Amino acid sequence: MESNKMRITGSLINAFYICPRKAWLLAHEFGPDPENVFIELGRILSEETYRREKKEIVLENMKIDLIKRAKEDVIVGEVKKSSKGHHAAKMQLVFYLYQLKQYGISAKGELLIPKEKKKFKIDLTQELEGELKQTFLSIKKTINQTQPPLPKKSSFCRNCAYKDFCWV
């Protein structure tokens, strides 16, 4: 996969922060285990929460969980099962805010974790935008490799839908 053809998505950003190997597999279109219970739990969570909001907005390389208005503001929400991958989820949301900014849309973000009853407000700052741009470069470098990075054991491996690619 050449970098100029690569489309960075929110899911790829999230995967890269969790595990660069997972991002490589995702970018090279290796599918996760379709019977992974955590994928099904995520789908159910997405369907059953925030029913009054506009959900699953698909734009070019983004699949935004929900969008709502609060007075003058457009709020983009990212829903997660837990706060375990907080920074990865935050950067996924920052990616959406950055992409919307490229379209001339100023939005604010909310990272939503309904099971834990937590909500984190995220604004696109220059610092986060700078980190995101650095991440773009790191992702391109990683996924342009002919082989995936070697697996590294982490606390995310246990529930990962890609674990069979690493630990069989």
Image (tube, helix red, strand yellow):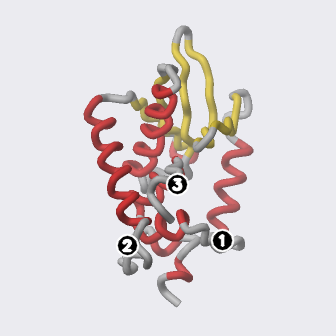
Q: Amino acid at mark 2?
A: Ser
The reply to whether callout 2 and callout 3 are in contact (CB within 8 Å) is no
Q: Amino acid at mark 1?
A: Asn
Residue 1, given in percent of the width and then of the height, sits at 51, 65
Residue topped by disc 1:
36
Q: Pick the residue in front: 50 or 138.
A: 138
Q: Amino acid at mark 3?
A: Lys
Residue 2, given in percent of the width and then of the height, sits at 47, 62
Q: Residue at x 55, y 30 (%)?
A: 76
Q: Secondary structure at mark 2?
A: loop
Q: Is residue 56 left or right of residue 150?
A: right
Say the numbered circle drawn on residue 154.
Answer: 2
Q: Could you tell which of marks 2 and 3 lies nearer the N-terminus?
A: 3
Is 92 placed above or below 25 here? above
Residue topped by disc 3:
5
Q: Pick the residue in front: 168 or 142.
A: 142
Q: Is residue 38 left or right of residue 105?
A: right
Q: Pick the residue in front: 6 or 104.
A: 6
Residue 132, given in percent of the width and then of the height, sits at 35, 43
In space, the residues marked 2 and 3 are separated at their CA atoms by: 30 Å
Q: Secondary structure at mark 3?
A: loop
